[in-house]
Amino acid sequence: MAEADWDTVTYLRKKAPSAKQAKSQKAVNSALRQGQQVETNKKFSAGTNKQHSSSKDTAKLDRETEELHHAHVSLDVGKAIQRGRQAKNLTQKELATKINEKQQVINEYESGKAVTNNQILAKIERAIGLKLRGKNIGEPLGGKKK
């Protein structure tokens, strides 16, 4: 026991750095100081969602001078929905349940704040029995047959 040197430490096994530790700035600087080879690559659009990446159309939109916006439902359509719903003695919630939509969707359509969606308009047309698209807004859905 007298020969044991208490100042030296023997490592039987040293853990390799984890991937996160190996990529840290501290690990890269340490490797550079030791003269080890370090490879760095910049990944193109790494960690981004493809839906939100910029595309060629972004520059085209930037060059546009006029204001771009979505077409909202006209107030005539909103009033027709309201009249048809009230004629069938339905609340907004009941109509929404009937067409498998939220009550807020019906509210937005009646107030003219909703963005036009033909699928939802078709559901509402069938539920209240009035035309909401085309020229004859507010007329009965069956109409005249030729």
Image: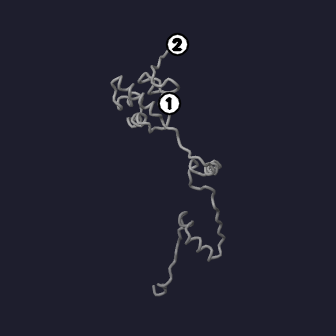
Q: Residue at coordinates 56% horizontally, 45% vertically from top-left?
A: 68
Q: Residue at coordinates 43% horizontally, 21% vertically from top-left?
A: 129
Q: Residue at coordinates 47% horizontally, 34% vertically from top-left?
A: 74
| Alpha carbon distance from label 2 to label 1 | 24 Å
Q: How many marks?
A: 2
On residue 145, which mark appears? 2
For the C terminus, the image quarter is top right
Count residues near mark 2 (Cα–Cα under 10 Å), then give few for <14, some for 14-19, many for 20+: few
Q: In this view, does 51 lie to the left or right of 110?
A: right
User: In the rendering, at what x and y percent does residue 70 appear?
Assistant: 53, 41
Secondary-structure class at tag 1: helix
User: In the rendering, at what x and y percent does residue 40 appear?
Assistant: 64, 65
Q: In this view, does 115 lie to the left or right of 86?
A: right
Secondary-structure class at tag 2: loop
List the residue tagged with mark 1: 119
Q: Earlier in the sequence, mark 2 or mark 1?
A: 1
For the N terminus, the image quarter is bottom left
Q: In this view, does 94 lie to the left or right of 140?
A: left
Count residues near mark 1 (Cα–Cα under 10 Å), then give few for <14, some for 14-19, many for 20+: few
Q: Which of 28 and 74 is in front in this view?
A: 74
User: In the rendering, at what x and y percent does residue 119 appear?
Assistant: 50, 30
Q: Which amino acid does label 1 sit on?
A: Gln
